[in-house]
């Protein structure tokens, strides 16, 4: 019985010669690689400028939170927050719309 020609190996298997000292190195010169992400220097965070409120400067000294009676602190240009917590430790936050603080609770 003969074996078809397509199943017979057409080349000899290449066997790699092993060295006693280990595998040979491919590149002996300096290696140009990117540093690992954890090895890069971490940039310093940019300082956050103070929040500019859209309200009149003296108005924050007069306004008080209708729920807690605490002073209102500007969170950003569009919100005010009470310095005292109301229920469950939550500080009420009020929007500023067109330069007017909307101090209606639940809105």
Image (cartoon, helix red, strand yellow):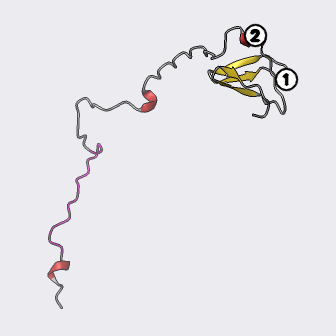
Question: In the picture, residue 98 is in which quadrant?
Answer: top right
- Mark 1 vs mark 2: give the one in front: 2
Q: CA distance from mark 1 to mark 2?
A: 16 Å
Are dots 1 and 2 in contact, CB under 8 Å? no
Determine if the magenta segment contains residue 106.
Answer: no
Between discs 1 and 2, the one toward the N terminus: 2
The mark found on residue 80 in the picture is none
Residue marked by disc 2: 61
Sort mark 2 into few (<14), some (14-19) or many (20+) by Cα contacts within 10 Å: few
Q: Residue at x 14, y 81 (%)?
A: 5
Q: Which residues are magenta?
A: 8-23
Out of 26 and 40, give the one closest to the viewer.
Answer: 40
Horizontal placement of 67 versus 26: left or right? right
Q: Give the x, y percent position of residue 7.
A: 20, 79
Total number of numbered labels? 2
Sort mark 1 into few (<14), some (14-19) or many (20+) by Cα contacts within 10 Å: some
Q: Residue at x 72, y 18 (%)?
A: 73
Out of 28 and 68, give the one closest to the viewer.
Answer: 68
Horizontal placement of 48 versus 68: left or right? left
Q: Give the x, y percent position of residue 56.
A: 67, 11
Residue most toward the bottom? Answer: 1
Horizontal placement of 66 versus 4: left or right? right
Q: Residue at x 67, y 22 (%)?
A: 75
Determine if the magenta segment contains residue 9.
Answer: yes
Residue marked by disc 1: 68
SS at circle 2: helix
- In the picture shown, does residue 36 fall above or below 26? above
Quarter holding the N terminus is bottom left
Q: Residue at x 16, y 88 (%)?
A: 2
């Amino acid at each position: 019985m003969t074996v078809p020609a397509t199943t017979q190996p057409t080349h000899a298997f290449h066997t790699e010669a092993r060295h006693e000292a280990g595998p040979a190195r491919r590149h002996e010169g300096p290696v140009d690689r990117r540093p690992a992400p954890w090895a890069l220097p971490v940039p310093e965070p940019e300082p956050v400028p103070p929040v500019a409120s859209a309200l009149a400067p003296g108005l924050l000294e007069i306004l008080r939170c209708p729920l807690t009676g605490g002073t209102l602190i500007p969170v950003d240009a569009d919100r005010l927050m009470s310095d005292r917590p109301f229920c469950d430790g939550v500080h009420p936050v009020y929007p500023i719309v067109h330069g007017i603080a909307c101090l209606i609770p639940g809105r």
